[in-house]
Image: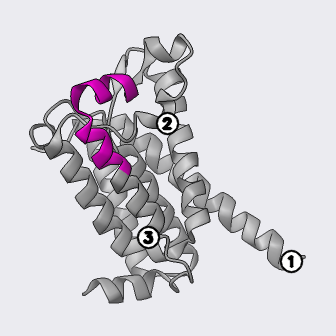
Amino acid sequence: MGLRKVRHFLGRVAPDPGWPVALSIASLSVLAQIGGDSAREWLRFDRTAIAAGEVRRLLTGHFVHLGWSHAAMNVAGLVLIWLLVGGLFTSLQWLIVGLVSILIIDAGFWLKETQLEWYVGLSGLLHGILAAGVVRGLGRSGAEAWFLGAVLALKIGYEQFAGPLPGSASAAGGPVIVNAHLYGAIGGAIAALLLHRSAGRAASI
């Protein structure tokens, strides 16, 4: 089944499919990677630096990577996910999804992962984007949304019980923080539900 059919089952394509958001995320990731090790050190999520007041890292840490292979893998994942679910929200709605996902990831890191000193990577946000698309698709009775949701739940469940997927650490070039995926998915689902609730209120006015 092609991507067009998948998106048909997931729901009607939004009038503004949000590609500017995806391109911005990809561009920021590439630019940060061009900056090399110095940019990574300056932008990564770093608990000590954040505690010292460098709060920008709560946002920028999600756009820097361990290396080019890590960045390329995440950008490719972003493109694939956007082809599947990118048309389900507008650019503004995707910005909300992204910000809520990042907020939940950061909160999870800060409050629950107290041993985590630093983090880089887009994968948590990617799980948030996919989870938001799944929730939106489920609300429209999309058959493929159930399939994507099951795949996402199985992946996260596997990671929680068995650790990173085989080969993912070597592909990324470093350790995989699987709880970033969990927190990102929770954040994306929350954002989708909030947007759905907001749309329902607007329709009733």
Residue in view at x 13 percent, y 35 percent:
173
Q: Mark 2 near mark 3, Cβ–Cβ under 8 Å?
A: no
| Residue 51 appears in the figure | yes
Colouring convention used in this rendered image of the protein: one colour
**Whole-percent x and y of residue 177?**
30, 33
Residue marked by disc 2: 59
Mark earlier in primary sequence (1, 3): 3
Residue 153 versus residue 2 in the image, above or below:
above
User: Which residue matches tag 3?
Assistant: 19
In the rendered structure, find residue 204 and report the number of the disc placed on it: 1
Crowding at mark 3 (Cα within 10 Å: few <14, some 14-19, many 20+):
some
Residue situated in front as seen by the camera: 31 or 85: 31
Question: Residue at 49% of width from left, 36% of height from top?
Answer: 59
Query: Magenta span covers which residues?
Result: 28-44
Q: Earlier in the sequence, mark 2 or mark 3?
A: 3
**Marks 1 and 3, how far apart in space?**
29 Å
